[in-house]
């Protein structure tokens, strides 16, 4: 039977979202289904009659290689279920749920695909519990969801970090400087770890392995003594000093974001080694631009699988990449489970074996 399905992108954007949308539309078209994309995430559900774009083959042609999301997104608004740094929770109010149901009825939608990170999937789970037929698609450049081995956007972010390190490498060695680059990763250091290894970093600081400034300085001194006069340090924004606190900066009244640890590391290196040091905060460059081939493929596979899950009636599930297969898991079992870098993992050991210091 022909179906009408809604799709939305929610939370922070990342490369690969458009690949998912295109995958959804193509798989749905094969089944003769219609797809409607809500504008600005869940917020599009609150507009009378729905604020949506009909997603056709023509509308989604040529979007796979575009970063961002053609639907728009927000990590604010009426559907927030996680607040602050994500550790406090709240619920979507009943009137918002009622309005959502009304929109879905008005548009005669059979299902809603919610593409988002942990917070947006927590919202999706609540909608599911309220009787809305929801399918989740996990998204985060941070790659920190336990229920999926990988999320699209991560590989593109890693490529961005590696590219930045390649550039910093040449200028660092010309000037014999120490370059500190702060990258995303609030709770998990995946981007720093993978980007750092791929870009030839000498020191990588991640939230999972608390560091000491003196050990970082020692690693710099050791390199200098060996005649390696430039040093590249990658610092995850959530990197933690031993016995210290995560560094936050206020961005608006009552709102703060991670940031500042890169500069703090640079200042300490200069103070302790007299080495000339520069800092670069890579920021949202990691979230922009075209997705890598891997993210295009993963995004497409996720989109196609989401449609398959609707056909099978597996509501309350989200797609997940496990053992090289795109499978599904219950959203309820996937949310609030953060995947952290294990300090004794093979990946960390490999880094140590090629001489990378974690400042521990
Ligand atoms: O969770 C993804 C992420 O990119 C984090 O790595 C980063 O700290 C945060 O989002 C930035 O959020 P915003 O786009 O609101 O500044």
Image (tube, grey):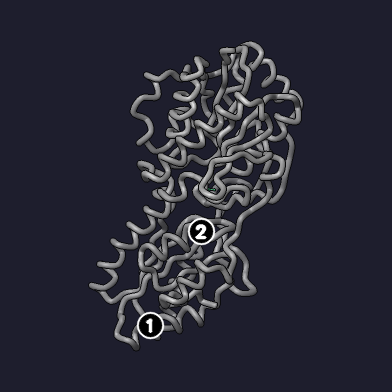
Q: Please give left or right for residue 174 compared with residue 158 in the image.
A: left
**Which residue is at the far left?**
174
Measured in 3D between alpha carbons, the distance from the residue under mark 1 to the one under mark 2, in whole angstroms, is 30 Å
Look at mark 2 in the image and give the residue it sits on: 190
Q: Is residue 120 visible?
A: no
Answer whether residue 121 is visible to the viewer in this image. yes
Q: Nearer the viewer, residue 117 or 221?
A: 117
**106 vs 83: above or below:** above
Q: Earlier in the sequence, mark 1 or mark 2?
A: 2
* Residue 282 horizontal/vertical position (percent): 40, 55
| Secondary structure category for the residue under label 1 | loop
**Residue at 48% in and 40% down:** 13
Image quarter of residue 43: top right
Q: Is residue 299 above or below residue 274?
A: above
Residue 268, placed above or below residue 128: below
Residue 209 spot, x, y in % from top left: 57, 70
- The numbered dot on residue 156 is none
Residue at figure coordinates x 67%, y 45% from the top left: 335
Where is residue 359 drawn, in percent x and y? 51, 76
Badge 1 local density, few (<14 within 10 Å), some, or many (20+)? few
Determine whether, in the image, residue 120 is placed left or right of residue 359: right
Q: Nearer the viewer, residue 173 or 316?
A: 316
Residue 221 image offset from top left, x and y in percent: 40, 85
- Asked if the residues shown at circle 1 and circle 2 are in contact, with their CB atoms under 8 angstroms apart, the answer is no
Q: Which residue is mark 1?
A: 274
Tag 2, which secondary structure? helix
Q: Nearer the viewer, mark 1 or mark 2?
A: 2
């Amino acid at each position: 039977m022909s179906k009408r399905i809604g799709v939305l992108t929610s939370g922070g954007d990342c490369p690969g979202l458009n690949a998912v949308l295109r995958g959804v539309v193509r798989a749905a078209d094969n089944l003769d289904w219609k797809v409607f994309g809500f504008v600005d995430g869940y917020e599009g559900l609150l507009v009378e009659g729905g604020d949506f774009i009909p997603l056709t083959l023509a509308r989604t042609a040529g979007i796979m290689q575009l970063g961002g999301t053609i639907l728009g997104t927000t990590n604010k608004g009426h559907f927030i279920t996680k607040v602050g740094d994500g550790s406090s929770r709240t619920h979507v109010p009943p009137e918002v749920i009622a309005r959502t149901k009304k929109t879905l009825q008005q548009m005669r939608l059979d299902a809603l695909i919610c593409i988002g990170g942990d917070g947006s999937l927590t919202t999706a789970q609540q909608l599911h519990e309220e009787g809305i037929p929801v399918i989740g698609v996990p998204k985060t450049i941070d790659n920190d969801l336990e229920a999926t081995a990988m999320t699209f956007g991560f590989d593109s972010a890693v490529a961005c970090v590696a590219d930045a390190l390649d550039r910093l490498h040449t200028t660092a060695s010309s000037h014999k400087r120490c370059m500190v680059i702060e990258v995303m990763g609030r709770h998990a250091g995946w981007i720093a770890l993978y980007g750092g290894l791929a870009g030839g970093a000498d020191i990588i600081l991640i939230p999972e392995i608390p560091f000491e400034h003196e050990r970082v300085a020692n690693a710099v001194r050791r390199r200098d003594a060996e005649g390696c006069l430039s040093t590249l340090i990658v610092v995850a924004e959530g990197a933690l000093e031993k016995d210290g606190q995560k560094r936050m900066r206020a961005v608006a009244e009552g709102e703060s974001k991670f940031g500042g640890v890169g500069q703090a590391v640079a200042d300490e290196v200069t103070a302790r080694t007299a080495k000339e040091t520069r800092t670069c905060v890579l920021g949202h460059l990691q979230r922009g631009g075209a997705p890598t081939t891997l993210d295009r493929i993963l995004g497409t596979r996720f989109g196609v699988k989401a449609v398959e899950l609707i056909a099978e009636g597996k509501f309350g599930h989200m797609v997940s990449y496990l053992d090289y297969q795109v499978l599904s898991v219950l959203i309820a079992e996937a949310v609030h489970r953060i995947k952290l870098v294990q300090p004794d993992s093979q990946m960390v050991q490999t880094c140590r074996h090629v001489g990378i210091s974690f400042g521990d």
